[in-house]
Amino acid sequence: MTIRFVTSNEGKVREAREYLTDDVEQIDYDYTEIQSDDLAEIAVAGAKEAFEETGRDDPVLVDDAGLFVDALGGFPGPYSSYAEDTVGVERVWNLVEQEENRRAKFRCVVAYYDGDEARTFEGAVPGRIVAPRGDGGFGYDPIFEHEGATMAEMSTERKNAVSHRGRALAKFADWLAEN
Ligand SMILES: O=c1nc[nH]c2c1ncn2[C@H]1C[C@H](O)[C@@H](COP(=O)(O)OP(=O)(O)OP(=O)(O)O)O1
Ligand SMILES: [Mg+2]
């Protein structure tokens, strides 16, 4: 089976290919990202729209993810992509730099839709916000440290083994194998 991963983010696709045995085709369809504080709601709405608008044949996968910083009340959260495009990763670091509590989480929801019932799979990883280090990965990876390394300092394989997306994809892969 081919899974159509609807995203403009090549980093997400690279990570999904590392994880899933099925073929993963990237579809660069720009679905509406609804405004919600619930990643699952955003991902499901996107998956349904993308499925309807891109031919209704192979099932689609949509991944909605974000960085949730404790000291900032969960900001940027569901607005992570907007914050990255506007203020940028370096200035998100600056917001946290003075805080004593640098704890944060990456969260990810992947939504799978084949025209029947939408399924969601979630993953999260705890970490700490640090000054940018490393040049792998994408997005907030350089400022997100987990067990001593930033995610930008990890190989795709190592990042997948611990990451929010890896955990969500692992659940999805298990479900897919049984269905
Ligand atoms: O593993 C990650 N490592 C670093 N940063 C990450 C990660 N996962 C999500 N993020 C950041 C990127 C973006 O600023 C936001 C997700 O936004 P999100 O809308 O889900 O993705 P996106 O706009 O990059 O691609 P698309 O919507 O086309 O799938 O959180
Ligand atoms: Mg997006």
Image (tube, grey):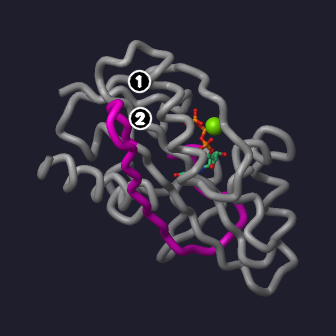
Mark 2 secondary-structure assignment = helix
Tell whether position 53 is magenta.
no
In the image, residue 5 above or below residue 94: above
Question: CB of residue at label 2: within 8 Å of ligand 1?
Answer: no
Residue 3 placement: quadrant:
top left
Q: For this view, does 126 lie left or right of residue 163? A: right
Q: Quadrant of the N terminus?
A: top left
Locate residue 122 relative to residue 41 in the image: left or right: left
Tell me where residue 133 appears, x and y as whole percent.
Answer: 63, 58
As drawn, 132 above or below 99: above
Q: Which residue is mark 2?
A: 13
The three-letter amino acid code for the residue at tag 1 is: Gln
Under mark 2, the amino acid is Val
Would you say 92 lies left or right of 111 here?
right
SS assignment at label 1: strand
The residue shown at (56%, 63%) is: 106
Comparing 100 with 171, the one in front is: 171
Q: Which residues are magenta?
A: 112-138
- For the point 33% across and 52% down, the residue is 169
Asked whether 114 or 104 is in front, the reply is: 114
Q: Which mark is residue 26?
A: 1
Q: Can you give x and y, in whole percent of width and height, for residue 118 in the image?
A: 39, 44
> In the current view of this chain or complex, which residue is farthest to the front?
116
Q: Quadrant of ligand 2?
A: top right
Q: Residue furthest bottom?
A: 100
Q: Nearer the viewer, residue 25 or 176?
A: 176
Question: Residue 82, labelled with which disc?
Answer: none
> Do tag 1 and tag 2 residues touch (Cβ < 8 Å)?
yes
Dot 1 or dot 2: first in sequence order is 2
